[in-house]
Each structure stands twice: as structure tokens, then as C-alpha cells.
Amino acid sequence: MPIAIKPRDTVREVGGPASDASFSDSGAIMADDTFIQVLLSELQVDEGVRLTVYDDATGKPLRQGDTIIGIPTIAIGRNLQDRGISQEISLMLAREDVDGAVLDLNRNVPWWIDLSFNRRLALVNMCFNMGWPRLSKFKKMWAALEEAHGFEFSGLEPQAKAAYGRAADEALDSKWAREDVQKDRSERLAKYIREG
């Protein structure tokens, strides 16, 4: 599908003469996929490809507390200060991070997938927020969840309910719940764990 781009005057074929451009009603040139692919290849060489945020003036990756001299930039010269990212890209990035959280849970606590919809929502939300290395340190929460899972699948509902309650309490009894996220988020996720 052609993509509209704004020209200064005419389009030039790479290594070729100026050509007549096909203009849309808005005045933009309609660029074909070949044009875009060639342009993207050149931009990757010209700008480089950086998958973490960096200072475009120094070329150094940005870390928390760094002083920025230029403009925070990512990918192929994406100016985050002036352009940011689109809603579509933010959802795409979030989806990739959700997929990563699900993979971490599958690898480390494969029984999590048997839990109720809301409990799974809570665990993926927490893993998305803090990452598996940190979430894995909630030892008492994980022990209570695994115990509840066992009770639930053995038909021991009162014991399962009590264990889910302990798991929720353990989630709330953490620096994450007290300091790192908004209270309504931690309380909502704990409610999901407690009540399913």
C-alpha cells in the first residue's frame, strides 16, 4: 500500500534522475513500498539503530539520573522529546511486554495458567510492572498461591479461599504495594488474587 510523504519539490529515484511525482489530493507524494524500503535502509545506516534511549548529542545511553545534553532519542533517530510515540506504537510495545511477562510466568510457575481469569490478570499486571526477577522474590505470595491452587483442584474450597487471602495479603505487605505503585492499583490486584 502506498504511503504519503511530503516532498520539497520532486521525487528522485535512488541513483536516477528526478521523476514526475504522483500527488494525492492533500498534496503529498504517494511513495511505493520499494521507495520506503530503500529510504529505511539508508536511514538505518545514516542514523543507526538504537534499541534503548540515548542522548543524540553524545550518543551515550541514558540512565536514571543522567544529565541530557541533546535530545532523548531511540530506534532510527526517533526524537522522543518532540515526537514521542503514537498510541498505536505504545500499545504494540505494551503487548510485547505483556507477552514477555506471560512467558516468564509460563517458564517459572507453569501452574499459574490454571488460575481464574482475574488472578491471571493480577499476576501478569504485577509481572509487567516489576519484572519477573523482582516478582519472583514474593516467596510467601507464591507459596500461598501454589497452596491455594492445590486446594482448589482437590476440591478443598475453604482452604483454597484462605490461601488466596494469604497470597493477597502478602502482595499488599510489600514495598511494591506501599511505595512503588498507586494504592488503588495494588488494592485492585490484591482483590483479584483474593476473590478470583
Image (spheres, grey):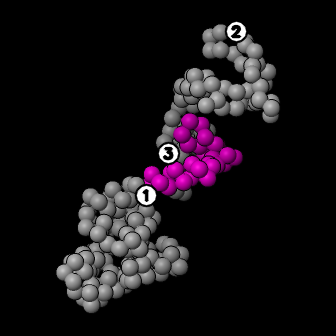
Q: Is residue 61 visible?
A: yes
Secondary structure state at the residue bearing disc 3: strand
Q: Is residue 147 visible?
A: no
Which residue corresponds to mark 3?
A: 52
- In reply to whether residue 82 is colored magenta, the answer given is yes
Between the C-alphas of marks 2 and 1, the distance is: 47 Å
Q: Judge left or right: residue 61 versus residue 28.
A: left
Residue 2's spot in the image, x, y percent? 64, 29
Q: Nearer the viewer, residue 81 or 57?
A: 81
- Under mark 1, the amino acid is Val
User: Crowdedness of circle 1 by 10 Å Cα count: few (<14), some, many (20+)?
Assistant: some
Q: CA distance from mark 2 to mark 3?
A: 38 Å
Tag 2–tag 1 contact (CB < 8 Å): no
Q: Which numbered dot is residue 98?
A: 1
- Name the residue furthest left: 154
For marks 2 and 1 on the same chain, the one whose residue lies earlier in the sequence: 2
Q: Which residues are magenta?
A: 68-97
Which of the image's four quarters has the C terminus?
A: bottom left
Between the residue at mark 3 and the residue at mark 1, the CA separation in whole angstroms equals: 18 Å
Q: Mark 2 or 3 closer to N-term?
A: 2
Amino acid carrying label 3: it is: Thr
Residue 25 painted magenta: no
Q: Which mark is residue 17?
A: 2
Q: Residue at x 61, y 31 (%)?
A: 1
Residue 32, quarter of the rendered image? top right
